[in-house]
Amino acid sequence: MAIPSEAEVEADTRDYYRARAPEFEQWILREGRYAHGPEADASWHREMAKLQQFVGSLTDASVFEVASGTGWWTRLLAVRNRVIASDYAPEMLDEARQRDEDHLPLGRCRADAYRLPAGDDSVDACMFGFWLSHVPIARSAEFIREAARIVRPGGQIVLVDSKQAEHSGASDQFVKGDRVQRQHRRLNDGREFTIWKIYWSSDELHSLLGLVCTEVEVIQTDHFFIGARGRVKAPASED
Ligand SMILES: C[S@@+](CC[C@H](N)C(=O)[O-])C[C@H]1O[C@@H](n2cnc3c(N)ncnc32)[C@H](O)[C@@H]1O
């Protein structure tokens, strides 16, 4: 069988999330194929609470969220910020709208992460959860520069993502391997896709964010998650 090209894997990644939208939050909530037993699931929820604290420290800001999915992070951010949440998949945006609470100050739009529909320096912060791990390495600098473009100097980039961990994905799908993976993923109905999944280390996140930010900080939870934030440099001082 021919190995799919990098662009084909990117396209499959987009198609996978469009098809997965209705069952996506089973992963976050540890339901169905994503349940791993009381101990691992309790750990997951504890670590997720730490991640929510990390993201929740963003306050009183205008935030552009990239690849917002079903709105798990949007709903948290919108309690204390003004949020525009974007995603490539209309199906994800539909799922998110069904979960939105009317009183929260947020808007939603369809957008490709590499061409954000926001002006230069137009927001206080750009946030993305579990998105960077789907950006092919060859496009990671392009993406981080696009995120930085829309944030005012001194504003923040905030991200959270996955560590490689046995009980993170579906119970029938864990593959231990390289930090850069073309992962085969299956939906509940058996449809299969090949997607990009990249596990960023703390040092690598420092380097990537360091292209566009100062004051880079990386946090990790015990098993499942990594997070990072930094303050966007003025363009003239970019390395
Ligand atoms: C793992 S999900 C994360 C969703 C959400 N941020 C969360 O943490 O719950 C990855 C998201 O990336 C979106 N996505 C895939 N390709 C994209 C692209 N080129 N531009 C913007 N979003 C994209 C998918 O539709 C999906 O919602």
Image (cartoon, rainbow, N blue to C red):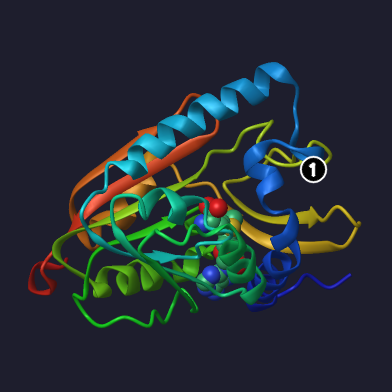
Quadrant position of residue 169: top right
In which quadrant is the N terminus drawn? Answer: bottom right
Residue type for callout 1? Gln
Quadrant position of residue 154: bottom left
Nearer to the camera, 212 or 62:
62
Q: Which residue is drawn at 58% across and 59% down?
A: 70
Mark yes or no: residue 130 visible: no
Q: Residue at x 21, y 76 (%)?
A: 122
Left or right position of 125 against 179: left
Residue 152 coordinates in the image, percent (x, y): 16, 69
Location of residue 172 with respect to 71 vertically, above or below: above
Location of residue 74 with respect to 236 vertically, above or below: above
Which SS class for mark 1? loop
In this figure, what is the number of numbered marks? 1
Residue 123 coordinates in the image, percent (x, y): 23, 69
Nearer to the camera, 129 or 235:
129
Q: Residue at x 32, y 39 (%)?
A: 218
Residue bearing mark 1:
173
Q: Residue at x 40, y 59 (%)?
A: 103
Nearer to the camera, 49 or 229:
49
Quadrant position of residue 177: top right
